Image (cartoon, rainbow, N blue to C red):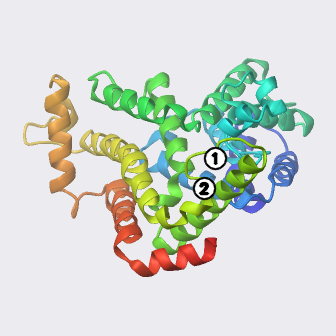
């Protein structure tokens, strides 16, 4: 985590904060030390999310229009989004009356803790000493916003809202509010992005995630609490079906709407015979018509279109979903490992 964090954060923070690079390196060391050795929510997960989230912002052209403060806030949020994670979810914290649930009033317990811990580390390591007073409020607000975006409790609602926003003719990456909405979608996708990685990596991450779920279920059972969904190790035979469902109903809709955004960005640069760009021709198109055109182009241009999200992420998501249920060896291997 320190290595990839320094690669991304040192230049970003030097540009945005004008502070010495040693301060950022110390910050990254402290961040890494504050990640627990959970099976899934650990420092390696943070590194993977940072990399995936940054890749998505670049692929969508979000980073080209972000200010220096915006880019730094996004990267810091990505690397700190699960800092001090307990290896248990929000519902466990609430049901067990964990002290954090008391502090944060049962609301986005872990995400609020991650955001607060991030800012405390920035203060204690001197990261904020060179930040201009006018930028501090914006920096903190954005870090909080990005970390809270990783809360899955409103996932489907947020994806739907972004789809509606994307259909709006006045949606533009040059508008700060729209740009930050797109960035929030990128960190959300980065957080569950292992599902779009090549199979060997995805399988390993999935096993780690399920292992952590089962540890939570074991503790819930020992405390006399109801075992949370997906946390019952006696249902290990259903792992393939649950992973397939997670990819198809949670991951794919998110990546598909990001692919739509990517395609609109490409269209904005492609001139038509009339001299206007595709997006200019569609500025006055009703939202349903625009959605049909996007879907049609997504299907017909897969081979030749430079869409990275469509060609790489979505194709890999679909391939991974199939393997979970179509290859008996996968179920046997994963079940054997988890038992």
Of residues 33 and 54, the one nearer the viewer is 33
Q: Where is residue 236 in the image (x, y as percent from the top left)?
A: 55, 65
Assign a secondary structure to mark 2: loop
- In the rendered structure, the answer to whether residue 163 lies left or right of residue 233 reads left
Of residues 14 and 23, the one nearer the viewer is 23
Q: Position of residue 307 (x, y in %)?
A: 32, 55
Quadrant (top left/top right/bottom left/bottom right) for the C terminus: bottom right
Q: Residues within 10 Å of mark 1 (few under 14, many from 20)?
A: some
Among all residues in the image, which is located at the extreme front? 224
Which mark identifies residue 227?
1
Residue at image location 22% in from the left, 50% down from the top: 298
- In the rendered structure, the answer to whether residue 95 lies left or right of residue 326 reads right
**Is residue 210 positioned above or below 110 on the image?**
below
Q: Position of residue 101 (x, y in %)?
A: 76, 29
Residue at image location 60% in from the left, 55% down from the top: 232
Question: Which residue is tagged 2?
Answer: 232
Assign a secondary structure to mark 1: loop
- Tell me, yes or no, whether the two marked residues, 1 and 2, touch with CB atoms within 8 Å: yes
**Is residue 289 positioned above or below 236 on the image?**
above
Q: Residues within 10 Å of mark 2 (few under 14, many from 20)?
A: some
Q: Position of residue 77 (x, y in %)?
A: 67, 39
- In the rendered structure, the answer to whether residue 336 lies left or right of residue 88 reads left
**Is residue 142 positioned above or below 42 on the image?**
above
Quadrant (top left/top right/bottom left/bottom right) for the N terminus: bottom right
Residue at image location 42% in from the left, 29% down from the top: 157
1 or 2: tag closer to the N-terminus:
1
Which mark identifies residue 203?
none
Residue at image location 64% in from the left, 64% down from the top: 208
Q: Report if residue 257 is visible in the image.
A: yes
Of residues 167 and 12, the one nearer the viewer is 167
């Amino acid at each position: 985590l320190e290595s990839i964090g320094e690669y991304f954060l040192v230049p970003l923070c030097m540009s945005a904060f004008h502070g010495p690079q040693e301060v950022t390196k110390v910050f990254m060391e402290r961040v890494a030390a504050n990640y627990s050795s959970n099976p899934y929510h650990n420092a390696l997960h943070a590194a993977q999310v940072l990399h995936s989230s940054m890749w998505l912002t670049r692929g969508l052209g979000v980073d080209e229009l972000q200010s220096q403060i915006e880019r730094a806030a996004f990267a810091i949020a990505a690397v700190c989004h699960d800092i001090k994670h307990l290896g248990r979810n929000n519902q466990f914290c609430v049901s067990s009356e964990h002290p954090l649930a008391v502090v944060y009033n049962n609301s986005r317990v872990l995400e609020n803790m991650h955001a607060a811990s991030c800012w405390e580390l920035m203060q204690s390591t001197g990261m904020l000493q060179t930040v201009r007073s006018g930028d501090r409020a914006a920096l903190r607000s954005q870090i909080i916003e990005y970390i809270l975006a990783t809360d899955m409790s409103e996932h489907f609602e947020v994806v739907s809202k972004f789809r509606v926003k994307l259909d709006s003719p006045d949606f533009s990456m040059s508008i700060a509010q729209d740009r930050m909405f797109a960035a929030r979608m990128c960190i959300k996708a980065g957080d569950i992005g292992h599902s779009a990685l090549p199979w060997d990596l995805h399988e390993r991450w999935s096993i780690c995630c399920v292992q952590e779920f089962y540890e939570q279920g074991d503790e819930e059972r020992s405390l006399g609490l109801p075992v949370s969904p997906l946390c019952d190790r006696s249902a290990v035979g259903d792992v393939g079906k649950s992973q397939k469902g997670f990819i198809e109903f949670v991951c794919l809709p998110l990546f598909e709407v990001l692919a739509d955004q990517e395609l609109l960005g490409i269209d904005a640069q492609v001139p038509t015979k009339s001299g206007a760009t595709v997006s200019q021709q569609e500025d006055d198109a009703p939202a349903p018509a625009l959605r049909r055109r996007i879907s049609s182009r997504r299907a017909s241009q897969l081979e030749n279109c430079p869409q990275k999200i469509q060609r790489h992420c979505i194709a890999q998501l679909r391939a991974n979903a199939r393997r979970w249920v179509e290859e008996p060896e996968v179920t046997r291997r994963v079940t054997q490992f988890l038992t």
